[in-house]
Image: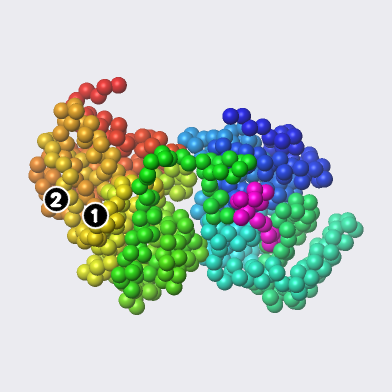
Amino acid sequence: MEIKPGPFLEPIHYPADLRKVKEEDLVKVCADLRQYIIDMVSVYGGHFGASLGVVELSVALHYAFNTPYDQLVWDVGHQAYGHKILTGRRERFHTNRTYKGLSGFPKRAESEYDTFGVGHSSTSISAALGMAVASRLKGEMDRQHIAIIGDGAMTAGLAFEGLNHAGVEDSNMIVILNDNCMSIDPNVGALKEYLTDITTSPTYNRFKDDVWKALDRLSKVGQISQDILSKLHDTMKSGLLRQSNMFESLRFRYFGPIDGHDVDHLVKVMKDLKKIPGPKLLHVVTVKGKGFALAEKDQTKWHAPGLFDKVTGEIYKTVSEKPQPPKYQDVFGNTLVELAEQNEKIVGVTPAMPSGSSMNIMMKAMPKRAFDVGIAEQHAVTFSAGMASQGLIPFCNIYSSFMQRAYDQVVHDVALQNLHVVFCMDRAGIAGADGQTHHGMLDIPYMRCVPNMVVSSPMNEEELRNLMYTSTLQKNAGPFSIRYPRGNGVMPDWKQPLKEIEVGKGRKLRDGDELAILTLGPVGNFAATAADKLATEGIHVGHYDIRFVKPLDADLLHEVFGKYKKVITIEDGTIVGGMGSAILEFMAEHNYTAELKMLGMPDVITEHGEPAELYAECGYDVKSIVKTAMEMMHVKVSA
């Protein structure tokens, strides 16, 4: 389906084209860009509300600054669709988030305008500061560096670390704080309240307006002198701003709050800021989903709604009409409430992902026992450790790839003290269209090397429920990790009572002759299907569900290697240091010499695409398993 841009967007392929537009026509460019994003995402899918909210900001940035020489760093990247469309990728934008197509996030290998690869939040300030310092050391004193960060991302410790350092560096750097009171879910915490106070304070805004009027008068005289600006800012810093503004106390020159949807004012302010040396922060107030009424009203739902009718707002169903099993995350959320009703020690923790992890189910049912701590994975883990030290049992739910950010806390604050924290790692394995920054491929190696840690993965949702129950038992007190994927699996029987699974014990699912398949987690379902197909070829394979990669089931493995001379291991994670590596270590320790083939994510960066496409590319979908087994059995593989 061909989607044509409006007349004011059509001639703009690169920022150089945009900068030829008359300033009075920028509002029309923004209208065309907003409509183009609506048209494209409604048909092809992707993130939605965040990019609509920064249309004017995207246009103003590329109009006021000399990109790509001046460097923009977009935080997270959900909001960068307008940026991509304005920087030479409009004709390819229909491939966004599809296999071999454009990435859904800024990516250095994709465009010189994507100055820094992003996908996890709160990295922009540190990255832009590094660029600014590098430019200063190279003598590029005219080069600007701009970090665009949301108020949700500003809750992370990394953002504060960057601000703290930037305040003492004499570098050309602008932080644009995009304040819309949202990340994926509504923002939480004291920072949100502080920004609301700034935005709504009559006294503060009168003072701010006086400052902007003074700057306006100065700019009309001609080139603003450095001396005048310095004196003006010295006055500001010694007055109301210095006393009441957190950013000024960190030695940033603060401007705002201003309307983030007034493109003309944004351009003027940005041109003024270019003339002011040192670190500066511009506070803009925007509405996530701006210009699409339903997205403005329900910002969480319209963060990434899938395909929809742009006129009626109907979100199209992409699955069969027949009943579907629940998502793993929903099984987690409902089971957590079930367990918490039985055990008053259980609490829930999530770093700004209540809807994404389904912690919102417990937050609604038991608001005093479920905590959204903001985008602060490190704090989430140590906060959980603190509660565990006092006898509670925290379920700390963090996406697998986001858990990487809290690794020191997992080791230092939980494992070294052998505290009873249950780590539930959502989005383990292939994450789909979010791609390389979101694939949960590393958690098996990084968790299994931690002392005291139990590392487990359920083959289906029923197993997830039972592993969660098992993790709460006093005899299993200590660090306990459960990894599970995005998406749906098999409908659990909610009427069945929760059952204990013995820690460190796997299970035999199928007997075989000469070849055995060992699996960890939901990829065991691929293996079960492959085993059925192999049986039609006269190849009968054994199938074992490892369940626990730490501790390993030694009795089960002795049975496997005592019977089978050929073994395939399969895991939805990197094969470097993963479950297959653990099996190899066991073989070496016990002098087993079976032929072993490891299937899983290869030691490369896996890009984005539909899960089925990526499973095939990585070589552990059903077809790949069948092919590998037949080759090991020296059976000719049909084309």
Q: Residue at x 59, y 33 (%)?
A: 92
Give whichever of 414, 488 is nearer the camera: 488
- Inspect this view and state whether residue 323 appears: yes
Q: Position of residue 281 (x, y in %)?
A: 68, 62
Q: In the rendered structure, are the residues bearing label 1 and label 2 in contact, judged by CB atoms less than 8 Å apart? A: no
Q: Position of residue 374 (x, y in %)?
A: 51, 64
User: Which quadrant does the N terminus fall into?
Assistant: top right
Indicate whether 557 appears above or below 470: above
- Inspect this view and state whether residue 455 appears: no
Q: Which residues are magenta?
A: 282-297
Looking at the rendering, which quadrant does residue 153 occupy? bottom right
Q: Residue at x 84, y 65 (%)?
A: 214
Which circle marks residue 314 in the picture? none
Q: Amino acid at mark 1?
A: Phe
Q: Is 296 a magenta residue?
A: yes
Q: Position of residue 431 (x, y in %)?
A: 42, 46
Which circle marks residue 548 in the picture? 1
Residue where numbered disc 2 is placed: 556
Give whichever of 57, 589 is nearer the camera: 57
Q: Amino acid at mark 2?
A: Leu
- Marks 1 and 2 sit apart, C-alpha to C-alpha, by 11 Å
Q: Is 613 a magenta residue?
A: no
Disc 2 secondary structure class = helix
Q: Residue at x 13, y 40 (%)?
A: 511
